Amino acid sequence: MAQHTQTAGKASLDLDLRSFKPTRGFVTVVVSTLALLLVCVIFAPSAVSAGGLAGSLPFAAIIAIVGLGQMLVVQQGGFDLSLAGGVSLAVVITTHLSGGDDAQLFGAIGLAFVCAVVAGLVNGILVGVLRLNAIVATIGMNALLYGAVFAVSGGVPRITTPLMAEIAGGKIMGIPHSVLFALAIMLIVSFVLKKTVVGRRFEAIGANPAAAHAAGLNVRLYQAMAYVFAQLHYCVAGILISGITREPTAFQGDSLLLPSVAVVVLAGTSLLGGRGFPISTVIAAFFLNQLSQFALAVGVPFSAQTIIQALALVFGIGVYSLRWKQAATKRALKSKTEETDNV
Amino acid sequence: MAKVAVMKLVETEPLHSAPRAAPTVRLSNITKVFSGVVALSDVSVDIHPGEVHAILGENGAGKSTLMNIISGVLQPEIGVIEFNGEVISPMTPERSAALGVSISYQHPAVLDDLSVLENLRVALPDRVFAAGDPAEIARAMLDDVGLHVPLNARADSLTVAQKHLLEIAKALATRPPVLILDEPTAALDQDATEMLFARIRSVVAQGTAVIYITHRLAELRQIAHRVTVLRDGQHAGGALVRDVTDDDLLAMIVGRSLASAFPPKSQEADPEINFTVKGLSGRKFHDVSFAVGRGQIIGIAGVEGNGQSGVMRALAGLEPWKGDVRLKGTSLSPAEVKAKSAYMPSDRHEEGIIADLTVRENATFSALDQFSNLGILSRRKEIGEVRKVFGSLSVKTPGLDAGILSLSGGNQQKVVMSRALMSRPGFILADEPTQGVDVGARFEIYRILREVSQSGTPVIVNSSDAAELEGLCDVVIVMSRGRVAETLRGDDVTEGRIVAAAVKAQSHVTGIGEATKAVKAATSGLRQFIQSDNATVVPLAAVVVLLGLYVFGQNANYLSAFNISNILLLATALGFIALGQTIALLMGGIDLSVGPLAGFLVVVASFFINDGQSPQTIALGFALMFLAALAVGTINGCLIRFANFTPIAATLAMYIGLQGMSFVLRDGPGGYINFAVMDTIGWKLGPLPVAFIVLVIVALLAEYVLRKRRLGWQFRAVGSHEESARRMGIRVTSVIIGGYIAVSLFTALGAVMLMVQIGVGDPAQGVNYTLASITAVVLGGTSLRGGRGTFVGTVMGAVLLTEVLNAVSFLGLSQTYQYVFQGSLILAAALIYSTARRQAGT
């Protein structure tokens, strides 16, 4: 009891530090990142020079944002393959519908958000309510989104408006705007997940839907909403890409799907669902991006970089897989029966 | 040793039905301990041939443990197992099966996705069916137990009772020397029970030793010769059934010492009623009524599985119900019942706690609204409330942010109680509140429940421990077969009365079982086909033909020999890869790495299979393709089975890795493929590519293996229900690793076709085949839940997908339509199939 009082008493002092209590994922990611930076300084200083970072950080920011979106879906035990379509659609809507005209930019951005919400809702209904498999539902949605991409763009890239380039590509005190966007989104996601009623319930449902259901929570609604908020993340990422890249293609999202899953896994979120780690996810995005920069700087051919990423992913999963085992076997046992009474 | 002596004394009396013989199974001084808790202590039992030996006892008395020791699933710490006088050490499931121990489980190991016949054939050794036509032999087995269902009916269309009969038929089929029946009549009606007893008598007459586990005294009298009673893991007595009275048996069952004290009961004779339930009916219970007075605790008793947990879950709003529920005089709607109730689930690990979260988070996740302002949490309020409640419940925790699993079972349960209390419920439902809780914490939990009840919140407790109900409850309703068998009040609430009411209840299931009715008389071939896995082939074929004709109407070139062979050639590459993907999905997994693997294998080929290479080099190229596929499949399978990766994680890492490997080998297109090789593989008979014919033949062969061979049943069994498959003796790990190897080998066949298509080693090719293969498989009608699938449907899906993509260009439509069609197709197919399955299932 004494021990208990002591801990609780301390809690009131360091209120805000508490949510940053290091987890296994956080420690793993931070240590790996620091080690990588150290190696960079010794062997490839150009990868950590101010110029090098300024060039590569925006891409890390994009991976971080889509990673945060994917994380929400993975937290609910899902998997979102429609990320590629979602990002690409936001890109082409911003570049094509604004027609290079700054005045129409915000209308286009608004439309991009509307499309994201619709796509997310359809995903959410298919998976959360109609109980379709997440992979099947999001493969289908991805194709539909690409249909929209071609309807908007005809598959031809177009140069973005100057205003967008300024919003996404500009710098404040040498820090690219896109990085600031990523950090702001990270703070919002962290705050909502850890400090609000819906966020805490969202995590509880992801960690054990059966217990949440038994406690009377609306499991399906939360599962469906994960897809909506994920799409909003993809949309922001797409809009930023349209400003960062001078002439973004219609397939801009394709190359982001795998990194998005990789950073979520590296940050310690279980693919079976549960707690999410927004800060670790963002650091993991930086790590993954920096890994490529390092490889590039020391002369590893571009081609071999994905092998390094794959190894990093295997290592990341390996670190956490022990903890997953129990959850996996338990779920395998009940997965068949849960379906019908999960009203 | 003393207990063995007692048994010997009993045995000296002559038996009425069987000749005196040496015991088939002899268990001597068996002791089994689970992490400090003694499950069986010094138990000795002899099981004789030609006899039904009943094992009697309350839940948790050690009956299942005893059975698992005989079947080799568990190994005893101390004690000797003898079979026909020979000491078996150690006993393993394989050894037990070889000795002829056959088990009918209480929860049938029946695979829903397989047909009745397939269930029998995958679970039984081949020799059982060697004598003649397997269908006739299976028919005879089912007739034996009075199960009249079509052999090709899917097991999920069977009622619970029919599944039990199927389980029993499996157990009897091997004509075992030792037959264990665990509560076989729990779901059976009167006729089926009679029939089962007749069967048991006939196998006993042939010399089988039967171990019959039951709760029902009435059944014991009908069927058993000898009885052993277990209590608290100890041998409480054994006798010949005809020599012992019901009262003697009851005395042996009850009377276990309970080490904890109970708070005093409600003294008020006629308290104000604050919670009533009238005529409550649901899926597994009927017409349940009771009333709770202020300060009273009501208990629900009965042998496990007689509707008690159904009542609890209905009152928690987790199951649909009909009837009238009143709280303090007001009738509640189902939504209000859900909102007002606080449910403490019996399965704490499954439904009570969230293992990944902290103690504090576990305590508050349903009550968070109270600590928040506009949805934003106040940490101070939350911690304050948690500390207050934890204080009054004396929860012992190393800290509020400790992991919930670091607490003892009793403290975990108190955290669950804290959550229930913090949400300020209208009434509390405690389902098995002290299961897995140590003695000290038990008393605390009883005290808390009593305090809650006294404060005016109605408390309903379900427990399979009659002694606990005696100590805790003021009113106890005893349930049997989903109905209230007896309501006990005041001084009548004794362990003896509760157990007597539960085990003496003779009523059999009515209206639930329907075991002996010949179900689904309409067994025409057509209906059977519609319910089969291959049903999708017909609508798919229709769509393929109609679409072809429509496009032909728009553009006559569409059905030209050139275009047809073009479509089929493209479909062949996709088809082979999708056949592989089908295997992964059948096993309940997925393989994301097939696309990059196909691309990688073409790149490998592009170094060997070139113009001007010797035949040996070309052969080496093909060999390397298949060897690389073999390696990739093995790595995937091992990552999944041995390193605990989820299939998505393992094959995703492989996806990225293979893509990198392709680019390492070639940074751009290069290495033209040998023309002669391409010509040979792309050879056509008229408009039909030979390769496509090969694909169809391979698919038909695979389909045959899937339906008719043990290997195919094993794949489906693993995907259908891994645990049941393991209980049936299937080597799950080997099957799954073999499965992923098969996926990669099929992908290698697809890669050969892809090589012919692109004609050059291009590291950027192939990746798209991952999503395309999943699309084709889903279109074909294979379920992503595992266990159900069709190779023929997959080929149709591949053809349809290719046809659609091809049609778009012939119709002069933009690329938009290509994507829209593809997306709509997969979503429509998935929705139609899942709806159809759901309806077939109900």
Image (cartoon, coloured by chain):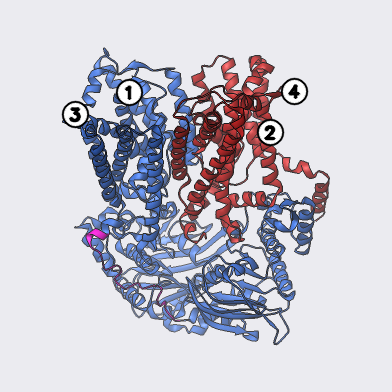
Chain colours: A red, B blue
Q: Are marks 4 and 2 on the same chain?
A: yes
Q: Amino acid at mark 1?
A: Ile
Q: Are marks 4 and 1 in contact (CB under 8 Å)?
A: no
Q: Element at badge 4? A: loop
Q: Are marks 1 and 3 in contact (CB under 8 Å)?
A: no
Task: Specify start and end residues of the magenta stretch as a single range.
Answer: B506-527
Q: Which residue is mark 2?
A: A183
Report the front residue among B728 and B631.
B631
Q: Which residue is mark 1?
A: B758
Report the front residue among B161 and B251.
B161
Q: What residue do we see at 60% from left, 26% from top?
A: A243
Query: Mainly helix, strand or loop, the magenta region?
Result: loop
Q: Which residue is mark 4?
A: A173
Q: Amino acid at mark 2?
A: Leu
Lateral position of residue B635 relative to residue B400, left or right:
left
Chain ID of residue with mark 2: A
- Say if the magenta span includes residue B394: no
Q: Amino acid at mark 3?
A: Lys
Q: Are marks 4 and 1 on the same chain?
A: no
Q: Earlier in the sequence, mark 4 or mark 2?
A: 4
